Amino acid sequence: MNSNNTKRAVHLYLESNPNPNSLKFVANYMLLPEGMSYDFPDRTSAKDAPLAEALFEFEFVDRVFYMSNFITVTKKGDVEWVEIKDKIKEHIQKYLESGKPIINEINKEELFDENDSETVKKIKGILDEYIRPAVEQDGGAIAFHSYHEGVVKVLLQGSCSGCPSSTVTLKAGIENLLKRMLPEVQAVEAEGV
């Protein structure tokens, strides 16, 4: 991240993803350290994220998500991308060119906790190695929430939140993979979607 106020050359390109209400705005450099993400489901949650807070000033912005080299913006359903995408792109580009931080303080959470059971360590490893890269490709993120009596709960963020195909991804993709690799897993559920 660039903390001094020097202008930098910023190039953004847009990528669609399975959620028709989300667009990925991909930068030509890393915005956050590898594996970190921040999800802002509303303006209040963005109080420590100046860029996200500024994006919420557009009445059509419903959610903002930061990860690696992209920002996923989810719009409200009553407006079309063709009407707003250039405004959002221009706003993000100007903000990034200013060199101001996109987040005030980075809180790095460790993926593994020494208190995790062997099963939880395996689940987190599978999520990180096999599932996270695919979900990131679609402009979202997945995080382990809990494991109890055969049920894995995960948090879906970014474009995955509220995406019509996220239930299919969860059941057909993530649940099948975890069940195949860890027989003790019986089901996967999304928390807070």
Image (spheres, helix red, strand yellow):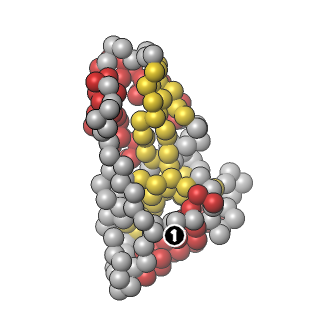
In the rendered view, tell whether residue 10 sits above or below residue 166.
Answer: below
Residue, disc 1:
51
Q: Residue at x 43, y 45 (%)?
A: 141
Residue 16's x, y, as percent? 47, 52
* Residue nearer the viewer, 164 or 186: 186
Look at the picture and state if 145 lies above or below 105.
above
**Observer able to see residue 110:** yes
Drawn side of residue 115 relative to residue 25, left or right? left
Hey, which quadrant is residue 112 in on the image?
top left
* Badge 1 density bin: few <14, some 14–19, many ≥20, Cα 10 Å: many
- The structure residue drawn at horizontal position 45% and vertical position 47%, both measured from the top left corner, is 140
Quarter of the image that includes the C terminus: top right
Amino acid at circle 1:
Leu
From the image, which quarter does the N terminus lie in? bottom left
- Residue sitting at x 51%, y 53%: 39
Q: Quadrant of residue 144?
A: top left
- State whether residue 130 appears in this view: no
Q: Residue at x 43, y 82 (%)?
A: 98
In the rendered view, does 141 fall on the left or right side of 62? left
Q: Residue furthest front?
A: 115
The relative height of residue 37 versus residue 152 in the rendered view (above or below) is: below
Q: Is residue 21 above or below residue 117?
A: below
Q: Position of residue 46 (x, y in %)?
A: 56, 62
Q: Residue furthest right?
A: 78
Expressed as whole percent of the image width and height from the top left, the position of residue 81 reads 60, 59
Secondary structure of the residue carrying tag 1 is: helix
Q: Position of residue 108 (x, y in %)?
A: 35, 54
Q: Nearer the viewer, residue 116 or 126?
A: 116
Nearer to me, 148 or 58? 148
